[in-house]
Amino acid sequence: MSKTSAFPAKLACFAAIQGFVSVAAGAFGAHALTKMVSERALSWWHTGSQYLMYHALASLIVAALFSYTPAVRKIIVCFLVGNVFFAGSLYVMTFTGVLWFGAITPIGGVLYLLAWFLLAKNLWQGQFKVN
């Protein structure tokens, strides 16, 4: 298998790992975290878990539907790195209570928006070949 054909599979693997983390984090939040943090902090955790799953699934769908191109790679990377910044900052904020981590969250949001924009743009222009 060439490096190029293996790369989307590795990105899809990272997306699957993020999906796993989302489910584990959601379960942890629903059962253990409720006794450890405030309602406000719990809402940050919940939002992080939701967005982590949404964009892990979006990454997997893009990886599964479309042939590998640099545009597909950019979209998936934006979703995955967006997850690190968005959900990651909310998770850290939940445990630390340090509110300035909330300034990092929008970086993830911008990466999500960029990924969705690139997906729409490439679909509109007929740039993707469906597998």
Image: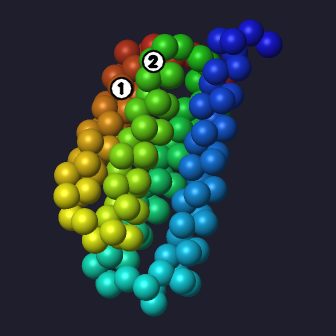
Residue 17, compared with residue 50, is above or below; it is above
- Residue 32: quarter of image: bottom right
Residue type of the residue flagged with mark 2: Ala
Give whichever of 7, 125 is nearer the camera. Answer: 7
- Whether residue 50 is visible to the viewer of this picture, yes or no, is yes
In which quadrant is the N terminus drawn? top right
Give whichever of 82, 94 is nearer the camera. Answer: 94
Secondary structure beneath label 1? helix
Task: Give neighbour class at mark 1: few <14, some 14-19, many 20+ (Cα, 10 Å).
Answer: some
Between the C-alphas of marks 1 and 2, the distance is: 8 Å
Residue type of the residue flagged with mark 1: Leu
| Left or right, 4 with reference to 81 | right
Q: Are marks 1 and 2 in contact (CB under 8 Å)?
A: yes
Residue located beneath label 1 in the image: 118
Residue at the spot 37% in from the left edge and 15% down from the top edge = 125
- Label ID, residue 44: none
- Residue 28 position in % (x across, y down): 56, 75
